[in-house]
Image: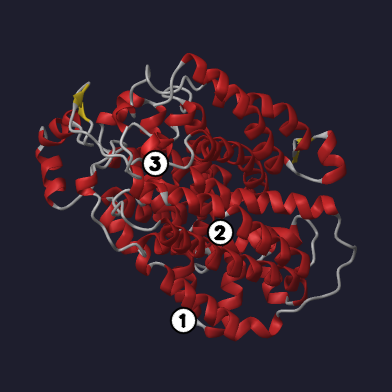
Amino acid sequence: MSGTDAPVLQDVEKDGVSIDGSSYAQKDWHHSYKWSRTLLQWGLETRGITPVPVAERVDTQYSKIFFIWLSANFNILSFSAGTLGPVVFGLGLRESCLVILFFNLLCSALPAYFSTWGPKLGLRQMCQARYSFGYYGVIVPSIFNLCSMIGFCILNCILGGQTLASISNGHLSWSVGIVVITLISLSVSFCGYRVLNWYERVAWLPVLVAYLVALGVSGKHLTNPPQAEPATAAAVLSFASTIAGFVITFGASGSDFTIYFKPSVQSWRIFLYSYLGFNIPIILIQCLGAAVAVSVPFVPEWEAGYANGNVGGLIEAMLSPTGNFGKFLTVLMALSVTGNIAPTFYSFSLSFQVFIPPLAVIPRYMFSLLATAILIPVSIVGAHKFYDTLTNFLGLIAYWASAFGAIVLLEHLHFRRGAFAAYDLRYWQDARRLPTGLAAVGACALACAFIVPSMDQVWFVGPFAKRAGDIGFEVAFFASGLFYVPLRYVELRFRPMV
């Protein structure tokens, strides 16, 4: 093993794939079709999960990752997540904002830290997880990650469709709005890294203008009425679990967008850009959502627009004093969700290749088409159950993402002493040399014995949760980590570390 901080990919051919990151099978696939060669000439990114060699990690515009996370969260989904505190959990404005502040600051540290690994290893996040979960074991978190990403896309499509429909006076259905939002997102994610980064650099600007105008014309209605009942610990922790689910799941795609950065970049720079990219939009917009939610009962126009949990209608009502300009801004707010869906489609493509490894030879962008085919019909079906879907989904995904993050983190910091040179990248897809994955998957399975009693969901409330609220994501992190350490030591006795 090299003693340098970042491992170097060797130019060795194995199983049809050059370990320098080039897939010969993929190149042949592309050059077999005229339309595919044309797309390549236009600069379309075709790389999937194959590692990026050091020679190709030359990007020095490190602020890109800030804008990726900024635009991905500067939208109406963040706003709607903030409304859950008062609307679903019965919290006052103060309690809602404190939960939003502290749990975002805490939980965003994990995906921000994982983002720093891309320049050092040149590996997508789920491929890097093979060094703890194994070649086959990582399929399990990949499935959960795919479901989580599709879930986020569904929520965003519903919100975008709602918002577009709210300004059409009945001439545009939610279904048509969902299709429009999805196709715009597909066009951005289809093109890949360069177009995605350009789009995310500018996508947040019109959303900022819309929020500022909404505050300017409707901010006078914001109030902080006295809470009917004191906040309970159970309500606070259950809302905290929802907030955690909103941000901690980005950990499964943290390094997907940083693999082209130069390995020499200081990790603290990538961490800081990522950390600010998460927290600036999420905290500000979620707190705004909470403030608007507690004020809705006191503003008849807002209450009418917000009927049946229609967040898009609420946004349109807030902007309505500006007339047609307000409708234009509402359209921009609807389109803001594409800033989240597009990078999610991008990571979906990569996780699918990890889920079914033989499909790695198929170009990345083809899986964006698959995600679109899944997303449109499911979003249309679930469009009228938004709040139930949002609450249940965000609370549930925090469990697996927390356990996944704990295991990957422990593998890196404890077993590999935080050294990127401890990863032998020659074996990134060698099932016989990578860990078996039994330790990681076994730790998650054993942790379920503690996670399930700590869950507070519509369909099940565990005995621990009945007294303390939803503490599932905290328990998932610590329980999976505690089980992983001894199981990993046992695994290392039978298969050496690579």
Image quarter of the C terminus: top left
Q: Which amino acid type is marked by label 2?
A: Leu
Q: Nearer the viewer, residue 371 or 23?
A: 23
Q: Which amino acid type is marked by label 3?
A: Phe
* Percent x, y of residue 251: 50, 46
Q: How is the image coloured?
A: secondary structure
The disc at residue 77 is: 2
The disc at residue 325 is: 1
The disc at residue 420 is: 3
* Percent x, y of residue 137: 48, 24
* Percent x, y of residue 451: 72, 33
Q: Earlier in the sequence, mark 3 or mark 1?
A: 1
Q: Is residue 305 visible?
A: no
Does residue 404 appear left or right of residue 186 in this picture?
Answer: right
For the residues labelled 3 and 1, say whether their Cβ atoms are less than 8 Å apart.
no
* Percent x, y of residue 492: 50, 20
Q: CA distance from mark 1 to mark 2?
A: 22 Å
Task: Specify the quadrant of the image occupied by residue 46.
Answer: top left
Q: CA distance from mark 3 to mark 1?
A: 52 Å
Closest to the camera, between mark 1 and mark 2, is 2
Q: Nearer the viewer, residue 340 or 276?
A: 276
Label 1: element kind: helix
Q: Nearer the viewer, residue 289 or 425?
A: 425
Q: Earlier in the sequence, mark 2 or mark 3?
A: 2
Residue 234 in the image: above or below residue 75: above
Q: Which amino acid type is marked by label 1?
A: Phe
Does residue 225 appear left or right of residue 477 in this picture?
Answer: right
Residue drawn at x 85%, y 40% is: 466
Residue 242 in the image: above or below residue 136: below
